[in-house]
Amino acid sequence: MYSLLWLFDTLITLYVWILIASAVLSWLVAFNVVNPQNPFVRNVGEFLWRVTEPVLAPIRRLLPNLGGIDISPVLLIIGLYFIRNLVFEMFT
Protein backbone atom coordinates (compact mmCIF):
# COMPACT_ATOMS: atom_id res chain seq x y z
CA MET A 1 0.00 0.00 0.00
CA TYR A 2 2.86 2.38 0.73
CA SER A 3 4.14 1.90 -2.81
CA LEU A 4 0.84 3.14 -4.23
CA LEU A 5 0.88 6.13 -1.89
CA TRP A 6 4.44 6.89 -2.94
CA LEU A 7 3.45 6.68 -6.63
CA PHE A 8 0.42 8.93 -6.03
CA ASP A 9 2.59 11.45 -4.17
CA THR A 10 5.24 11.38 -6.90
CA LEU A 11 2.70 11.95 -9.68
CA ILE A 12 1.14 14.90 -7.87
CA THR A 13 4.56 16.41 -7.18
CA LEU A 14 5.56 15.97 -10.82
CA TYR A 15 2.34 17.62 -12.02
CA VAL A 16 2.89 20.54 -9.62
CA TRP A 17 6.36 21.06 -11.10
CA ILE A 18 4.87 20.95 -14.60
CA LEU A 19 2.36 23.63 -13.56
CA ILE A 20 5.16 25.79 -12.19
CA ALA A 21 7.23 25.31 -15.36
CA SER A 22 4.24 26.27 -17.49
CA ALA A 23 3.67 29.47 -15.50
CA VAL A 24 7.35 30.43 -15.60
CA LEU A 25 7.57 29.79 -19.34
CA SER A 26 4.49 31.91 -19.97
CA TRP A 27 6.09 34.77 -18.02
CA LEU A 28 9.37 34.39 -19.92
CA VAL A 29 7.53 34.53 -23.24
CA ALA A 30 5.39 37.49 -22.13
CA PHE A 31 8.46 39.53 -21.10
CA ASN A 32 10.42 38.56 -24.27
CA VAL A 33 13.11 36.74 -22.34
CA VAL A 34 12.79 33.67 -24.56
CA ASN A 35 11.84 33.63 -28.21
CA PRO A 36 8.63 31.65 -28.84
CA GLN A 37 9.75 31.15 -32.45
CA ASN A 38 12.61 28.95 -31.26
CA PRO A 39 11.62 25.33 -32.06
CA PHE A 40 12.74 24.00 -28.67
CA VAL A 41 10.85 26.68 -26.74
CA ARG A 42 7.80 26.16 -28.94
CA ASN A 43 7.85 22.39 -28.38
CA VAL A 44 8.28 22.73 -24.63
CA GLY A 45 5.53 25.34 -24.49
CA GLU A 46 3.19 23.19 -26.56
CA PHE A 47 3.83 20.17 -24.34
CA LEU A 48 3.24 22.16 -21.15
CA TRP A 49 0.08 23.73 -22.58
CA ARG A 50 -1.33 20.35 -23.66
CA VAL A 51 -0.64 18.81 -20.26
CA THR A 52 -1.95 21.65 -18.11
CA GLU A 53 -4.72 23.33 -20.12
CA PRO A 54 -7.34 20.54 -19.84
CA VAL A 55 -7.21 20.87 -16.05
CA LEU A 56 -6.81 24.65 -15.85
CA ALA A 57 -9.54 25.60 -18.35
CA PRO A 58 -12.50 24.56 -16.13
CA ILE A 59 -10.98 26.43 -13.18
CA ARG A 60 -10.55 29.55 -15.32
CA ARG A 61 -14.20 29.38 -16.37
CA LEU A 62 -15.31 29.41 -12.73
CA LEU A 63 -13.09 32.31 -11.67
CA PRO A 64 -14.10 35.93 -12.18
CA ASN A 65 -12.04 38.18 -14.44
CA LEU A 66 -9.13 39.48 -12.37
CA GLY A 67 -7.71 41.83 -14.99
CA GLY A 68 -5.01 39.69 -16.54
CA ILE A 69 -3.96 37.87 -13.38
CA ASP A 70 -4.34 34.12 -13.66
CA ILE A 71 -4.54 32.43 -10.26
CA SER A 72 -5.85 29.12 -11.58
CA PRO A 73 -2.44 27.36 -11.29
CA VAL A 74 -2.20 28.43 -7.65
CA LEU A 75 -5.69 27.15 -6.90
CA LEU A 76 -4.95 23.87 -8.68
CA ILE A 77 -1.72 23.38 -6.73
CA ILE A 78 -3.56 24.02 -3.45
CA GLY A 79 -6.26 21.56 -4.51
CA LEU A 80 -3.74 18.90 -5.49
CA TYR A 81 -1.93 19.18 -2.17
CA PHE A 82 -5.26 19.04 -0.33
CA ILE A 83 -6.23 15.84 -2.17
CA ARG A 84 -2.79 14.36 -1.56
CA ASN A 85 -2.99 15.06 2.17
CA LEU A 86 -6.54 13.76 2.33
CA VAL A 87 -5.52 10.47 0.70
CA PHE A 88 -2.56 10.14 3.07
CA GLU A 89 -4.83 10.69 6.08
CA MET A 90 -7.28 8.07 4.84
CA PHE A 91 -4.73 5.33 4.17
CA THR A 92 -2.10 5.78 6.86
Image (tube, rainbow, N blue to C red):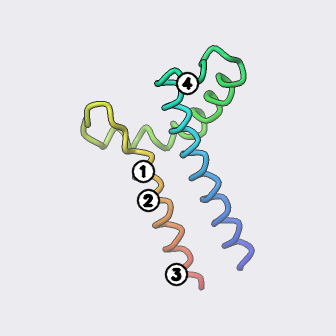
User: Circles 1 and 2: CB distance less than 8 Å?
Assistant: yes
Residue sitting nearer the eye, 25 or 14: 25
Q: Position of residue 79 (x, y in %)?
A: 44, 59
Q: Is residue 52 left or right of residue 75?
A: right
Name the residue beneath numbered marker 4.
Answer: 33
Disc 2 packing (10 Å; few <14; some 14–19; many ≥20): few
- Name the element at disc 3: helix
Along the polypeptide, which appears first: circle 3 or circle 4? Answer: 4
Q: Position of residue 19 (x, y in %)?
A: 55, 45
Q: Quadrant of residue 87?
A: bottom right
Q: Position of residue 64 (x, y in %)?
A: 25, 39
Disc 4 packing (10 Å; few <14; some 14–19; many ≥20): few
Nearest to the eye among marks 3 and 2: give it. Answer: 2
41 is higher (above) or lower (below) than 79: above
Q: Position of residue 53 (x, y in %)?
A: 51, 36
C-alpha gap between disc 4 and disc 1: 23 Å
| Residue located at (55% from left, 24% from top) | 33
Along the polypeptide, which appears first: circle 3 or circle 2? Answer: 2
C-alpha gap between disc 3 and disc 4: 43 Å
Residue sitting nearer the eye, 40 or 48: 40
Q: Is residue 18 left or right of residue 72?
A: right
C-alpha gap between disc 3 and disc 1: 23 Å
- Residue 74's disc number: 1
User: Circles 3 and 4: CB distance less than 8 Å?
Assistant: no
Residue type at mark 2: give it.
Ile
User: Circles 4 and 1: CB distance less than 8 Å?
Assistant: no
Residue furthest toward the top?
Answer: 37
Name the residue beneath numbered marker 2.
Answer: 78
Disc 3 packing (10 Å; few <14; some 14–19; many ≥20): few
